[in-house]
Image (cartoon, rainbow, N blue to C red):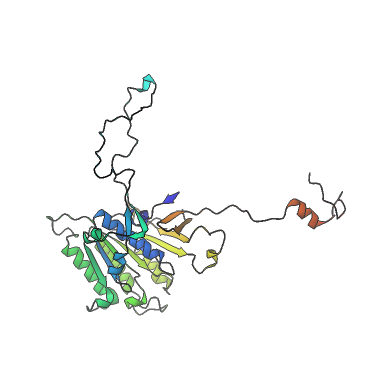
């Protein structure tokens, strides 16, 4: 069973914070972040992207192209068929079922949950121009940093300003807003000025967790949803990483097979990595739910990124046959034949 990539990020309800643990090369985690942003473009949401390494404009320009559903969406210029139209050759049924109400089994519209994207093509620039973007690039920011938030004070202030000015906090009743999608790339890395990836006892040990706590409070009081990617494999303190998980609603981890023993293993030759779902939001509950299904794998094709259940191949390794095994054992036991002859297997 294939799992749509957009389900990882768009299943999350509004006011939800999704923490994504990056893979070691930050190639697949960046791709999932682009999926999250591309879904916002197609749905007409406003986007906010923060980064300290790559410029947000470069990430936005590389969003994948959405794929239109040609089987459901009628072509331009073709009239829509009437609702009570019958097929040219209707199937004959028994007379006792003719008076039963008809059940609509075909899709009646092109709207569905989520969309699909072509990774080999880039999104149309006209579609990007119709979307309102808000970006935060750390090397270009010169705001003062508070002592409690450390290097993340400017980022939090920027998010607060966008939510307040655009009316996502509900302050303006006359303006109808949809959803604000927040994306923060590689939060906690050394480029942000934090030392959680450099020392087991960082000087700003509470700055990262304080920011996540404040971000979670902002999401609860606004029409916003956030995806934050963190280099979990570089964070030295496990206690800091544990607090980050507790301050997030949903946590997803990507484990890449690149430069590992599994990359050349025949068992995982069809996949490029594993997807670990640490926790998911649990409605009407103070704690998150930890799913039992932990056997998910992903693979990157030329045009799509697919997530599916991990199915190990059957054991087809060459084993010693019973005939060769009997030869190796030689003549031993009651009624055994000479060593040069093959034993009979009853």
Residue at image coords 25%, 77%:
140
Q: As rendered, which of 235 and 254 lies closer to the eye?
A: 254
Residue at image coords 52%, 53%:
311
Q: Is residue 249 in view from this perspective?
A: no
On the image, the x and y values in percent for residue 190 come to 36, 77
Q: Is residue 5 in view from this perspective?
A: yes
Q: Residue furthest top?
A: 95
Q: In which quarter of the view is residue 47 placed?
A: bottom left
Q: In which quarter of the view is residue 96 placed?
A: top left
Residue at image coords 28%, 31%:
85
Relative to residue 219, is residue 76 depicted above or below? above
Q: Is residue 274 left or right of residue 217?
A: right
On the image, the x and y values in percent for residue 332 come to 84, 54
Number of numbered markers: 0
Q: Residue furthest left?
A: 174
Q: Is residue 23 left or right of residue 129?
A: right
Q: In which quarter of the view is residue 101 placed?
A: top left
Q: As rendered, which of 64 and 235 lies closer to the eye?
A: 64
For the C terminus, the quadrant is top right
Q: As rendered, which of 106 and 248 lies closer to the eye?
A: 106
On the image, the x and y values in percent for residue 169 come to 19, 60
On the image, the x and y values in percent for residue 9 come to 34, 57
């Amino acid at each position: 069973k294939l799992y749509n990539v957009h389900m990882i990020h768009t299943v999350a309800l509004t006011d939800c914070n999704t923490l994504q643990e990056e893979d070691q090369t930050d190639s697949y985690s960046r791709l999932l972040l682009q999926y999250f942003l591309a879904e916002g473009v197609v749905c007409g949401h406003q986007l906010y992207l923060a980064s300290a390494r790559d410029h947000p404009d470069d990430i936005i320009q590389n969003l994948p192209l959405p794929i239109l559903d040609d089987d459901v969406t009628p072509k331009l210029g073709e009239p829509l068929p009437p609702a009570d139209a019958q097929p040219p050759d209707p199937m004959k049924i028994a007379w006792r079922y003719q008076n039963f109400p008809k059940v609509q089994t075909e899709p009646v519209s092109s709207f569905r949950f989520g969309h699909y994207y072509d990774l080999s093509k880039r999104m149309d620039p006209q579609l990007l121009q119709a979307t309102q973007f808000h970006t935060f690039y750390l090397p270009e920011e010169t705001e003062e940093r508070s002592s409690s938030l450390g290097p993340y004070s400017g980022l939090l202030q920027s998010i607060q300003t966008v939510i307040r000015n655009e009316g996502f906090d509900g302050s303006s009743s006359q303006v109808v807003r949809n959803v604000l999608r927040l994306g923060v790339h590689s939060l906690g890395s050394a480029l942000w000025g934090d030392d959680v990836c450099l020392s087991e006892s960082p000087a700003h040990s509470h700055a990262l967790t304080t920011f996540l706590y404040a971000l979670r409070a902002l999401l609860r009081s606004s029409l916003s949803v956030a995806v934050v990617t963190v280099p979990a494999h570089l964070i030295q303190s496990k206690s800091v990483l544990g607090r980050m998980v507790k301050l997030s609603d949903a946590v997803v981890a990507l484990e890449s097979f690149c430069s590992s023993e599994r990359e050349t293993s025949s068992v995982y030759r069809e996949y490029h990595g594993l997807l670990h779902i640490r926790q998911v939001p649990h409605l009407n509950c103070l704690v998150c739910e930890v799913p039992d299904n932990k056997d998910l794998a992903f693979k990157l094709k030329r045009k799509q990124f697919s997530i599916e259940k991990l199915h190990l191949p059957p054991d087809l390794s060459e084993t010693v046959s019973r005939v060769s095994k009997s030869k190796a054992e030689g003549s031993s036991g009651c009624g055994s034949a000479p060593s040069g002859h093959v034993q009979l297997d009853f």
